[in-house]
Amino acid sequence: MKAYPSQNIKVFVLVLAIIFSLQQASSQDQNFWSNVRFGGNLGIGFSNDTFSAILAPAAIYEFNPWFSAGFGLNFGYSSFDNDRFNEEGNSTNYGASLITFFNPIPEFQFSAEFEQMGVSRRFEVPGETFKDNYWYPALFVGAGYRTGFVSFGIRYDLLFDDDKSIYGSAYAPFVRVFF
């Protein structure tokens, strides 16, 4: 049984909430909505036997030019049909995430994201069908290049579990857009 650092996650969420609350209290005279950015991720992938699609809308609040934080929703679907081994299956996932960005310079972005996903999987081999429903946490740290409204880079899942993750690797490239 793999242990997850749940204490670290709780501390991360608590610190994020405190920072957000303190910033809100100190900037009562600013227009809240002028600092909110909407966007997120949209992805599609396919190979000879696999198809996947991801929709992840998000909203962030820019506290200052260097730090922003927010939340997102995540929806995904993937399917595969492997004729060589006569296997097929699909997976549907949904959930939410907390996101933080740190921009030491405008073009460079560090990110941290806690994601909690509900996963529903079905896998068929000749004569048998396997079904699995569970919740999967992911804690990503990443770095990317930002130009205008778009940032792209790579992130790493600190809680990656090869048997339960919806991702094929702990490393995942990203493209984010926020307006």
Image (cartoon, rainbow, N blue to C red):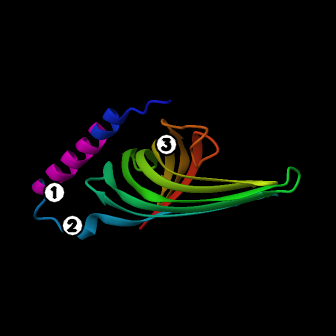
Residue toward you, 158 or 3: 3
**Three-letter amino acid code of the residue under disc 3:** Ala
Residue toward you, 146 or 38: 38
Q: Residues within 10 Å of mark 3 (few under 14, many from 20)?
A: many
Say whether residue 17 is magenta.
yes
Image marks 1 and 2: residues in contact by CB distance under 8 Å? yes
Q: Say which label, 2 or 3, has the lower sequence index.
A: 2
Is 23 situated left or right of 84 in this image?
A: left
Which region of the structure is painted magenta? Answer: 11-25
Q: Say which label, 1 or 2, has the lower sequence index.
A: 1
Say which quarter of the image contains residue 168: top right
Say whether residue 100 is magenta.
no
Q: Does the rendering let one see residue 44?
A: no
Q: Say which label, 1 or 3, has the lower sequence index.
A: 1
Residue marked by disc 1: 24
Residue positioned most to the right? 84
Residue marked by disc 3: 143
Q: Compared to 176, does 154 lie above or below?
A: above
Is 40 situated left or right of 13 in this image?
A: right
Give the alpha-carbon distance from disc 1 to disc 3, as whole Å: 27 Å
**Three-letter amino acid code of the residue under disc 1:** Gln
Name the image quarter holding the C terminus.
bottom left
Residue marked by disc 2: 32
**Three-letter amino acid code of the residue under disc 2:** Phe
Q: Compared to 110, does 131 lie above or below?
A: below
Give the alpha-carbon distance from disc 1 to disc 2, as whole Å: 8 Å
Say which quarter of the image contains residue 27: bottom left
Q: Does the rendering let one see residue 115?
A: yes
